[in-house]
Image: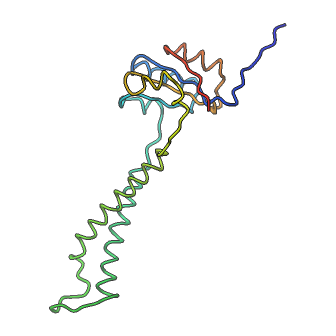
């Protein structure tokens, strides 16, 4: 009787498969999802239409964050001026009313744009996990040589409940990958 020896996957981040074309990558991503894999990511040198759908990515919360930042900027800018001119330092100039709200609109607009832009930049850094000086795919020589030029990669993480080193490797080869790499954590 032959003993089955399982490779040590404690330091394994996952598997990275390279594909020839974006169409092959999309087809492989769809089939991997149908096979039950959920913790996967794709890497391409340019945006590929349909890849985010194949990965079943959730909609980004960034637009809501930007809207909230803009709304906070508009309200904050308006209230800041109203407080300054009506409560903190009221001046009667030429018999005009203290609360002359049309004059607050340009500054409220500017604070809207400022806060929306700041919320967008900060949200981008948080949601995209920037800066990320290290990622396990950076150790792959093939990825380093081709990812920004002509490589289309699908990575499946070892933390996926369905992940089994041999079964996942076999699936990636069946999906038409030209190269499969083990990524160490």
In the picture, measured across the screen, residue 182 lies left or right of residue 131, that is right
Q: Does residue 111 sit above or below 8 in this rendering?
A: below
Quadrant of image for the N terminus: top right
Quarter of the rendering occupied by the C terminus: top right
In this picture the colour scheme is rainbow
Figure check: 31 above or below 80: above
Using the image as rendered, state which of residue 93 and residue 131 is in the foreground.
131
Query: Which residue is painted at 65% across and 21% down in the image?
Result: 165
4 vs 69, left or right, is right
- Position in image of residue 122 (x %, y %): 42, 54
| Quadrant in the rendering for residue 105 | bottom left
Q: Residue at x 32, y 72 (%)?
A: 77
Q: Residue furthest top?
A: 1
Compared with 120, 59 (above or below) is above
Q: Is residue 57 shown left or right of residue 181?
A: left
The residue most toward the left is 94
Q: Position of residue 33 (x, y in %)?
A: 53, 27
Residue 80 lies in quadrant: bottom left
Residue sitting at the far right: 1
Residue under the image location 24 percent in, 91 percent down: 91
Q: Nearer the viewer, residue 36 or 133?
A: 133
Q: What is the total number of numbered labels drawn onto the structure image? A: 0
Q: Measuring 28% from the left and 69% from the top, which residue is drawn there?
A: 108
Q: Percent x, y for residue 168?
A: 61, 20
């Amino acid at each position: 009787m032959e003993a089955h020896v399982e490779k040590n996957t404690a330091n394994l981040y996952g598997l990275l498969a390279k594909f020839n074309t974006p169409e092959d990558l999309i087809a492989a991503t769809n089939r991997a999802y149908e096979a039950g894999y959920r913790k996967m990511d794709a890497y391409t040198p340019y945006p590929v239409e349909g890849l985010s759908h194949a990965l079943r990515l959730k909609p980004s919360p960034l637009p809501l964050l930007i809207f909230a930042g803009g709304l906070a900027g508009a309200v904050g800018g308006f209230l800041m001026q109203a407080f300054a001119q009506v409560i903190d330092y009221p001046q009667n100039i030429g018999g005009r009313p203290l609360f002359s709200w049309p004059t607050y609109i340009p500054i409220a607009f500017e604070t809207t744009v400022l806060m929306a832009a700041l919320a967008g930049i900060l949200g981008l850094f948080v949601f995209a996990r920037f800066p990320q000086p290290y990622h396990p795919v950076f150790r792959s020589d093939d990825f380093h040589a081709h990812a920004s030029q002509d490589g289309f990669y699908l990575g499946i993480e070892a933390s996926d409940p369905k992940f089994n080193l041999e079964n996942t490797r076999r699936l990636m080869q069946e999906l038409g990958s030209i190269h499969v790499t083990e990524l160490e954590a």
